[in-house]
Image: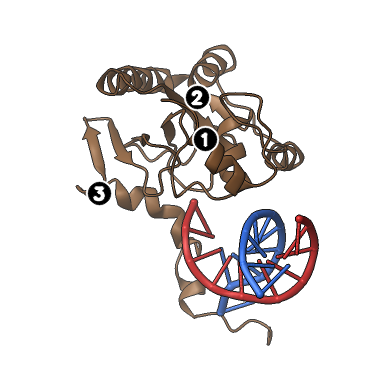
Chain colours: A brown, B red, C blue
Amino acid sequence: MSKCSKNVSDYVTSKPKQLWSLGLVESMKDPKSIYKENERIVVIRDKYPKAKIHYLVLPREDISSIYKLSKEHIPLIEEFGQIFKEIQKEHADFFLHCGFHAVPSMQRMHMHIISNDMISTCLKTRIHWNSFTTKFFLPYKDVLNKLKEDGLIDKMSPETHKSFMSIPLKCNQCDFEPKTMPQLRQHLLTHVQ
DNA sequence: GTTCTAGAAC
DNA sequence: GTTCTAGAAC
């Protein structure tokens, strides 16, 4: 393949070429990223927070995504809920959401814990916005209930994924429909937290 | 997941 | 002319 001038290492290693997708697994080992941890779970601060409060809850067990879950993981996921309750108490002046992205980019299953202000310089694109404010964001309780009832999480089709990402911008706290992300970011600052 | 940036949109 | 979005990344 003359078109391909790939490194030899691409062929001799089994590691994924998208090294960035392992970023969370790396952060789990970094004391500066860790917010709290126990025998089964690590909570890290999101490296690019999309709100004033934004944590990620991850299992130490090598589970790549919610699509690898089965009924045996129910106790683990229930502990995610306990961690959320703890963290909400620690941030009583914020309204926190917890849930999973339907199509995650990063490896290692992770639950987002994020405040509803959505005020952050890292919140830049429509995709950022829609991944937390549409049904692309799978609420924790829905995922737990689904696991209890069916023993697995249904994958979102690429078409559905695409449709959620292209939904017009709408404020998560009122009816305002900004035309651009800069307008939305400016608008969010007007909400009293 | 982010960065970079071409060119669309204004 | 500047702002903003969206697709490639070897």
Q: From where the camera sits, is residue A15 visible? A: no
- Residue A53 vertical placement versus A28 (above, below): above
Disc 2 to disc 3, how far (Cα)? 26 Å
Please tell me in which quadrant of the rendered image residue A120 appears. Answer: top left
In the rendered structure, which disc, 1 or 3, sits on the residue that comes first in sequence? 3
Q: Callout 3, which amino acid?
A: Lys
- Bin the neighbour count of mark 1 within 10 Å (Cα to Cα): few under 14, some 14-19, many 20 and up: many
Q: Is residue A124 left or right of residue A47?
A: right
* Residue at mark 1: A188
Q: Which residue was labeled with disc 2? A: A70
Q: Distance of mark 1 from mark 2, alpha carbons?
A: 38 Å
Above or below — where is A132 with respect to A85? below
Please report whichever mark, 2 or 3, sits nearer to the chain's N-terminal start: 3
Which residue appears at 72% of the width and 37% of the height?
A: A167
Answer whether labels 2 and 3 touch (C-beta < 8 Å): no
Label 3, on which residue? A29
Read off the chain for label 3: A
